[in-house]
């Protein structure tokens, strides 16, 4: 594994829900020791497989609001009536450990972080091959109630309009290809070229 030669960077993965960004983010984190995940804070309830401190910092609305008051967030947004936010302490934690940060966040938060960190940050919009396929994936996921699914679909349509504001658009048609493309973005952003192109 190479030493980090430069200051810490950021990779923001954003997408309409169901576009497969979490799968791609997990792949990258497993593949590169030099990356670490920005664990967001949220007021939504923990799903059975999730771990506090690894997937999210789960907290009450009161605690979240108190942290907003104390200016502890870089950004936060309301998503489907819950709050999600990136804590300043997460960015410090990852950069102080000598790694680069990976975010898995929705489009508005992604836009805000990109605006704040500019060239230190590569913002990648993951796009499903089509809206129809995305709706099908969301429906098949079976994690949502009918009303929640309806809200998610409406949001997806809105989020698709943001794609051109990011540094890269990655179409997640065939997952293996999308993973390779994401690897290319990471390697070229950190080292200026893919690893295997070294003399
Ligand atoms: P889920 O509840 O499915 O885990 O996440 C819902 C949405 O919130 C996803 O699009 C996820 O990427 C986004 N999200 C997670 N953490 C953050 C965050 O810290 N800030 C923002 N703006 N969005 C987040």
Image (cartoon, rainbow, N blue to C red):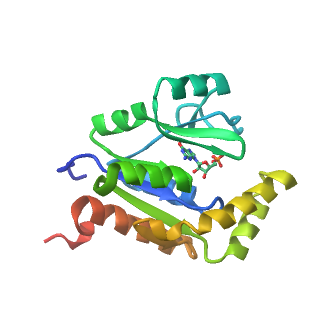
Residue at 56%, 53% in the rendered image: 106
Q: Is residue 59 left or right of residue 98?
A: right
Q: Position of residue 168 (x, y in %)?
A: 42, 69
Visible residue check, residue 60: no
* On screen, residue 97 above or below 129: above
Q: Where is residue 90 in the image (x, y as percent from the top left)?
A: 42, 35
Viewer-proximal residue among 2 and 39: 39
Residue sitting farthest toward the left: 199
Q: Is residue 49 left or right of residue 194?
A: right
Q: Is residue 118 left or right of residue 7?
A: right
Residue at 62%, 27% in the rendered image: 59
* On screen, residue 7 above or below 20: above
Q: Where is residue 178 in the image (x, y as percent from the top left)?
A: 49, 71
Residue at 81%, 59% in the rendered image: 150
Viewer-proximal residue among 61 and 176: 61
Q: In this view, does 110 lie to the left or right of 100?
A: right
Visible residue check, residue 141: yes
């Amino acid at each position: 594994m190479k030493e980090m030669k430069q200051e810490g960077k950021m990779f923001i993965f954003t997408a309409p829900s169901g576009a497969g960004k979490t799968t791609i983010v997990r792949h990258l984190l497993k593949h590169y020791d030099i990356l670490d995940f920005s664990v967001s804070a949220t007021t939504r309830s923990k799903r059975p497989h999730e771990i506090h401190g690894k997937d999210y910092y789960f907290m009450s609305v009161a605690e979240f609001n108190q942290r907003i008051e104390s200016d502890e967030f870089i950004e936060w947004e309301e998503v489907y009536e819950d709050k999600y936010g990136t804590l300043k302490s997460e960015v410090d934690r990852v950069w102080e450990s000598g790694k680069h940060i990976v975010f898995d966040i929705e489009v508005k938060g992604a836009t805000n972080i990109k605006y704040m960190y500019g060239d230190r940050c590569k913002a990648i919009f993951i796009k499903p091959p089509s809206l129809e396929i995305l709706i099908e994936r969301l429906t098949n996921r079976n994690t949502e109630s009918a009303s929640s699914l309806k809200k998610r679909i409406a949001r997806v349509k809105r989020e698709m309009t943001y794609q051109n504001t990011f540094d890269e658009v990655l179409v997640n048609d065939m997952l293996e290809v999308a993973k390779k493309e994401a690897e290319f973005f990471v390697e070229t952003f950190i080292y200026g070229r893919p690893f295997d192109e070294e003399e």
